[in-house]
Amino acid sequence: MSVQETIKNQVTGHKVVLYMKGSPDFPQCGFSANAVKILRACGVNEMFTVNVLEDPEIRQGIKQYANWPTIPQLYVNGEFVGGSDIVSEMYQSGELQKILQP
C-alpha cells in the first residue's frame, strides 16, 4: 500500500483525524498542542492521531495529500479542515463546533 493510500484510509476511516507532532498527551510543538486543546474544548474525546515525527513518509505524504505545507492537519469526516491557525479561527467563530457535531 502506498503512503497516499495509507493516508486516505486513515482520513476516511475515522471521524476526526489529526496529523500532529507528538501525541495528544505529549504534543511536541505548540501548534499541535493548540489543535488538541481546541478539539478537546469542542468535546472531542475520540480522535485518531498520527505522530508524523515517527514516520517520515507520512510526514511528507500528508503535505502532498492535502497540498498543505504545515503540520498539524485536521480532517473531519474525510475532509481536510486546515492547520492550527484555521482551526483556531473556526473555533472562535463557532464553525468548528458545527462540523464536529455528531
Image: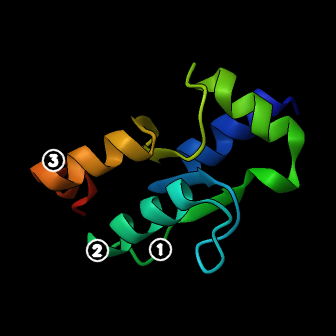
* Residue at 57 percent of width and 50 percent of height: 13
What element does badge 1 sit on?
Answer: loop
Earlier sequence position, callout 3 versus callout 2: 2
Q: Is residue 69 left or right of residue 53?
A: left
Q: Residue furthest left?
A: 93
Considering only vertical position in the picture, is 1 above or below 66?
A: below
Q: CA distance from mark 3 to mark 1?
A: 19 Å
Asked whether residue 43 is in view, the answer is: no
> Mark 3 highlights which residue?
95
Quarter of image, res 61: top right
Q: Nearer the viewer, residue 58 or 86?
A: 86
Along the polypeptide, which appears first: circle 1 or circle 2?
2
Disc number at residue 62? none
Q: Position of residue 64 (x, y in %)?
A: 67, 21
Q: Amino acid at mark 1?
A: Glu
Between discs 3 and 1, the one toward the N terminus: 1
Residue 42 occupies quadrant: bottom left
Q: Residue at coordinates 27% horizontally, 57% vertically from top-left? A: 100
Q: Which residue is mark 2?
A: 41
Residue 89 appears in the rendering:
yes
Q: In the rendered structure, are the residues bearing label 3 and label 2 in contact, judged by CB atoms less than 8 Å apart? A: no
**Residue 78, how many percent across, how many down?**
46, 40
- Element type where label 3 sits in the image: helix
**What residue is drawn where x is 23% and y is 45%?**
89
- Which residue is denoted by mark 1 in the rendering? 46
